[in-house]
Image (tube, rainbow, N blue to C red):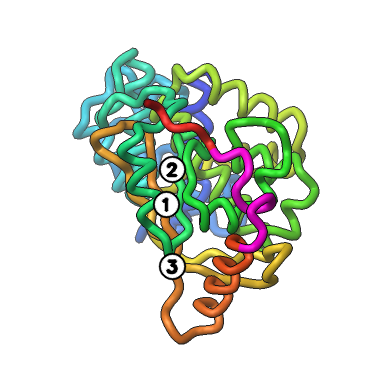
Amino acid sequence: MDAAHEIREFLATRRAKITPQKAGLPAFGGANRRVPGLRREEVAMLAGVSIDYYARLERGQLAGASEEVLDALSRALQLDEAEHAHLHDLAAAQRHRPPRRAARKAKTAVPASLTRVLDSMTDAPAFIRNGRLDILAVNPLGRALYAPLFTGSGRPVNIARFQFLDPTSRGFFPDWNAAVHTTVSLLRTEAGRAPGDAELTGLIGELVTRSDEFRAAWAKHNVRLHHTGRKPFRHPAIGEITLDFDTMELPAHPGLTLTAYSAEPGTPDHDALRLLASWAATSPDEAHQDAPVPDQ
């Protein structure tokens, strides 16, 4: 992925999202405005830089931009936390420096201590993934929840590859549009954090080539942080279930993320989670086979 192209498209798509009204500016030109959002000169004014300088930035020349300029640009474009971090990551990549966050290795194995932590979480589906959305380790209840992903022979299991290339994923993810947005935004965020990850680049290239839905979503240049929320599933054995999730990056293991699901006691979703646990206990061939092997 070309750094200048990524910067150019990211800034242009963010600029298109901000109307003059949203930015607190008069809408000069009214219905005759030729751009859907702000003009370059309007962004330059809001960021406190010259029009020529902003034009260079939007052409992909972020290498010389200071932290203060990037922050001013972020405020002008009303970037959220994920977009703000992504802008800094894109600038760092163009300077050929590591991102401001801890260096991220292309993790392929999980320390045994972390698998013990997963296995101790007996009432909550949980797994550990890397930034490419490879599931590298999973506890029994997590393996049961994501059972459709483990039916194929490819390892490690990859959430994005399943979602866009396996036709059964549309049934498993009932809120398909939300799932698409989340998956693509997470991969776009990781691409900014780890521009040198050849496996990530290969995965994105594969999905762009083979999936129209992925290609359309990727072109939007959306990024996001994925810390907590609710996610629905349509499980082939237990039916509909919506779970709360919490996602935690593991500072001692840069590049790895732990995700755990839960349900409020006394709710139908909690009953469904107990049913999932019962199914996992009575269907070991379906719920436990091919578990990832931890790093020793």
Within 10 Å of disc 3 (Cα), the crowding (few <14, some 14-19, many 20+) is some
Q: Earlier in the sequence, mark 1 or mark 2?
A: 2
Q: Quadrant of the C terminus?
A: top left
In the rendered image, which residue does mark 3 sit on? 262
Q: Quadrant of the N terminus?
A: top right
Q: Is residue 96 visible?
A: yes
Q: The magenta stretch spans which residues?
A: 282-291
Foreground pick, 58 / 255: 255
Q: Quadrant of residue 21?
A: bottom left
Dots 2 and 3: beta carbons under 8 Å? Answer: no
Q: Secondary structure at mark 1?
A: strand
In the rendered image, which residue does mark 2 sit on? 128
Q: Quadrant of residue 88?
A: top left
Measuring from the top left, give residue 115's x and y in whole percent: 38, 41
In three-dimensional space, the C-alpha distance between marks 3 and 1, rounded to whole angstroms, equals 10 Å
Q: Earlier in the sequence, mark 2 or mark 3?
A: 2
Q: Secondary structure at mark 3?
A: strand
In three-dimensional space, the C-alpha distance between marks 2 and 3, rounded to whole angstroms, equals 16 Å
Residue type at the position of mark 3: Ser
